[in-house]
Image: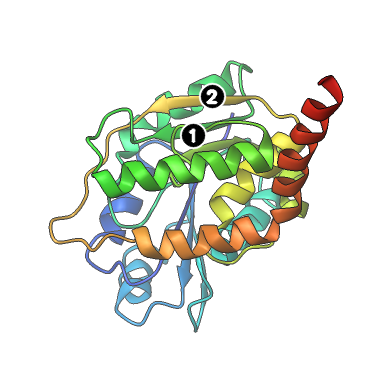
Amino acid sequence: MRIYALTAAYNEESTIVGVIEDELKHVDKVIFVNDGSTDRTLEKVQSRFSRNKNVEIISWDSNKGKGYALIQGFKKFLNSDGDILVTLDGDGQHDASQMSSVILPIEKHLSDVVVGARILTESPSRIRIFFNAIVNIVMLLTTGSLFVDVSSGFRAYSRNTIKKILPYLSFYDFAIEPQILRACVLNKLKFATISINVNYKKGRKSNIWRLARSYIRYTWKYKGDIIRKIVGRKVIKTIQQ
């Protein structure tokens, strides 16, 4: 099987070259998406990898959001000869050496999509615990399923999975992450969760509030699902009584 990595980055000049170098040790090809960085992210990647046939570079001038970058990366993957796609963030928090563990359930045909769960290995703050609890309730109401780490960017997908979920994806921000999981549930794809380690940079600002805003948009878009779940249960309970 040919394994591809997909990494989208916005202003990650201090880490992105190292991230791609680590990925190349474990995959056949890397798709790098520069999401309108205003620092030297693109310049550094081009300087280091422009002559490397195993690195494909996609770029645009203005920041469009993680969701847009992932969607374009998915399309590029489907136009390749790749069999499995692994997504990793560009800030260096993910350990590329763990990719073999993340893709294993797909290689063994035990799963269609694998999510690397940080919460199983880190000690999250109280606000992150609260946030994850709220997100899990939203996911339960919009998909009927619970997930350990909805916002994890370390995931693996089979080629068939990407084909099936791509038409369902429309968010350009962080809401793409729960939307991908919802699309997988709608397509009745098999899930697996793998514990992963993370390496957060010192002084790195939390994106918890940007995530919150994105997930509010996700909740609003699928409010009909939530209403049907809640109202439906009340109707069933009334009938049973």
The image position of residue 153, as x and y in percent, is 44, 47
Q: Secondary structure at mark 2?
A: strand
Q: Specify the quadrant of the image occupied by residue 15.
A: bottom left
Quadrant (top left/top right/bottom left/bottom right) for the C terminus: top right
Q: Are marks 1 and 2 in contact (CB under 8 Å)?
A: yes
Coordinates of residue 142 in the picture (x, y in percent):
67, 43
Please tell me which residue lies in front, 125 or 54.
Answer: 125
Q: Is residue 16 visible?
A: yes
Q: Position of residue 107 (x, y in %)?
A: 57, 21
One can see residue 154 in this view: no
- Residue 116 placement, left or right of 124: right
Q: Residue at x 51, y 73 (%)?
A: 59
Disc 2 packing (10 Å; few <14; some 14–19; many ≥20): some
Q: Secondary structure at mark 1?
A: strand
Residue 100 shown left or right of residue 95 in the figure? right
Q: Nearer the viewer, residue 165 or 23?
A: 165
Residue at numbered disc 1: 115
On the image, numbered disc 2 is attached to which residue?
192
**Picture quarter with the N terminus:** top right
Q: Earlier in the sequence, mark 1 or mark 2?
A: 1
- Left or right: 151 as drawn, with respect to 179: left
Q: Residue at x 42, y 57 (%)?
A: 52
